[in-house]
Amino acid sequence: MAEFRVRVSTGEAFGAGTWDKVSVSIVGTRGESPPLPLDNLGKEFTAGAEEDFRVTLPEDVGRVLLLRVHKAPPVLPLLGPLAPDAWFCRWFQLTPPRGGHLLFPCYQWLEGAGTLVLQEGTAKVSWADHHPVLQQQRQEELQDRQEMYQWKAYNPGWPHCLDEKTVEDLELNIKYSTAKNANFYLQAGSAFAEMKIKGLLDRKGLWRSLNEMKRIFNFRRTPGAEHAFEHWQEDAFFASQFLNGLNPVLIRRCHYLPKNFPVTDAMVASVLGPGTSLQAELEKGSLFLVDHGILSGIQTNVINGKPQFSAAPMTLLYQSPGCGPLLPLAIQLSQTPGPNSPIFLPTDDKWDWLLAKTWVRNAEFFFHEALTHLLHSHLLPEVFTLATLRQLPHCHPLFKLLIPHTRYTLHINTLARELLIVPGQVVDRSTGIGIEGFSELIQRNMKQLNYSLLCLPEDIRTRGVEDIPGYYYRDDGMQIWGAVERFVSEIIGIYYPSDESVQDDRELQAWVREIFSKGFLNQESSGIPSSLETREALVQYVTMVIFTCSAKHAAVSAGQFDSCAWMPNLPPSMQLPPPTSKGLATCEGFIATLPPVNATCDIILALWLLSKEPGDRRPLGTYPDEHFTEEAPRRSIATFQSRLAQISRGIQERNWGLVLPYTYLDPPLIENSVSI
């Protein structure tokens, strides 16, 4: 007979404790013990508790391999078993009669009656688990999770997603916490009530004036929203949003003018000044292009019974010498030049030029919300999340590394499929291209998607924007990419001694293959790997996954309300067609082109909610769930946190000198995962 000490830690979240009875079976190299009750006098397993138990094994089971945890409702005299409840277990610590502590990380909800098998916390790749019992456990765990988390094709040509209809159907381990869920609906309810009381959500007509729009602007105020309100008509602010606004991923250096954008020297002479030309500036590398060509011919929507319109503009920008501001030079609102598609210039009439810029901002709304935000920063992280849950067991080092960056992603995306991107909901009733247009954009972009776009250093080089001044998304993003890459490289170095060890990890290869097939639909032209052959390739790939799920999402999500609170800066629809000639625009015509009152308020409400984490936050690099138990990865985590703190200090110091601080990539403000 052998006596073991068992220490159990219960989570602190609301509802984490349980009244159910818990027992453990210890699985070793010589066999398995019967279930051993964990029972002291009084109530066990209360929220936040750490408790000690002593259990006696009738026979020696040999070296401990696994811990099997059993949970069942208590049985009361006359009443029978109570209804089972949920328990959040943080970890078990097992102390054998001889030898040190064995830690079994859990960090899972056990819902109802059932059994959970835990492996000792040392991270192991598939080829490092030699004992057949451990190999079998890895396979059984993945089979169970593959049954629990299944794929479905939500729309043709989209990345696949979780096969659940509503958040009520989700299992507890992927749901919002009670606190986060309550805060989310409290925020939504209060914002909805305010709009309703003002009578704006039900008003289908036009805004009476720009001045009247200030009523909605008072809804919520942020420094970014205030700045947009004050400067939205200025050329320098218009251009700066391509660098540091909500869609900072499209601007690229222009080495030659596209044939379908026939800008001439005479058109831009007043901005370029004397002594230079378009060709000279192209050769110097001071011209940049933002091309929304993917919007050409996109299907448009009907709002309040009125057809809406879209444009596919091209915008030429000029970086003036001496670190002057980036400025717009010319805008063409279609991809087909000609007499019905004039090139608008800063020297045009005020309302002509402002209307042209507003059409570009409307195109930015569509491109950002459908592609940069929804596709790249929600749907792809969902693919990474599902593949991680389905192909990597808890003991795998990559599971331990990645699981914090998947937290709540399946919940928020399932909620989006309930409330945002379905017929009749927000996107469909209040945006100029509706759900059909969003879907068409995603299908088009999936055919163009490539690996370099997802890897920030390569994306910056490809777009030729390494040295454009004042590009804080690039500057902060590159620092964070570098910190993540060093952290990932250290973790990979601990568990993979060679390139061959990467190739031989069948679980890793299955993970990469599933992402390729379910996320990128087996498109080899994308350059997305379907297998990984080297440690270097693995480091880049995992860095891309973590960066996409954290910093990239923060950069393109947190500023949505700042950009849209003053609606003319980011209109979600346009009610009149793009102008086909100059000299006809007026203030009244400008307002008549903008979205109606109810659509404006609908979108502002949604983007306010999507810009604001509803509590229960875990900033980048914060890992309260300690999946890694060895000293080496824990040291790497501490070093990573130190690097992020240093980056944050630099960002905050720089921001003191900026009229509009760029805060979206300040590490304490970046969530570990896509959770809103």
Image (cartoon, rainbow, N blue to C red):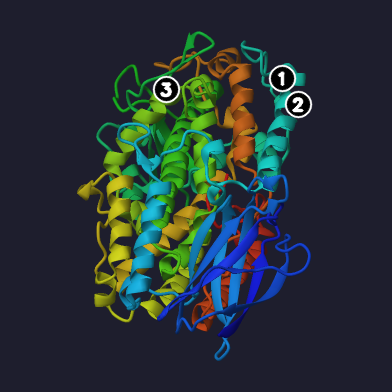
Q: Is residue 504 above or below residue 599?
A: below
Residue 630, how many percent across, how many down? Answer: 51, 80
Q: Amino acid at mark 1?
A: Glu
Q: Residue at x 72, y 46 (%)?
A: 78
- Mark whose residue sits in front, 2 or 1: 2
Q: Nearer the viewer, mark 2 or mark 3?
A: 2
Q: Which residue is mark 2?
A: 194
The answer to which of marks 2 and 1 sits earlier in the sequence is 2
Inter-mark Cα distance, 2 to 1: 16 Å
**Mark number displayed over residue 212:** 1
Task: State left or right for residue 603 relative to residue 52.
Answer: left
Per the model, the C-alpha gap separating discs 3 and 1 is 25 Å
Left or right relative to 218: residue 262: left
The residue closer to the viewer here, 325 or 1, is 1
Q: Position of residue 335 (x, y in %)?
A: 31, 28
In the image, residue 187 lies at what x, y percent? 71, 37
Q: Quadrant of the C terminus?
A: top right
What is the x, y in percent for residue 605? 64, 30
Label 2 sits on a secondary structure element that is helix
Whether residue 390 is visible to the viewer of this picture, yes or no, is: no
Circle 3 sits on which residue? 310
Q: Amino acid at mark 2?
A: Glu
On screen, residue 230 versus residue 430, left or right, reads: right
- Residue extending farthest to the left is 524
- Residue 299 figure quarter: top left
Which numbered dot is residue 516? none
Residue type of the residue flagged with mark 3: Ser
Numbered disc 1: secondary structure: loop
Give the answer, above or below, for where 464 lies relative to 634. above
Cα distance between the residues tagged 2 and 3? 30 Å
Mark 3 burial class by Cα count in 10 Å: few <14, some 14-19, many 20+? many
Q: Nearer the viewer, residue 252 or 69?
A: 69
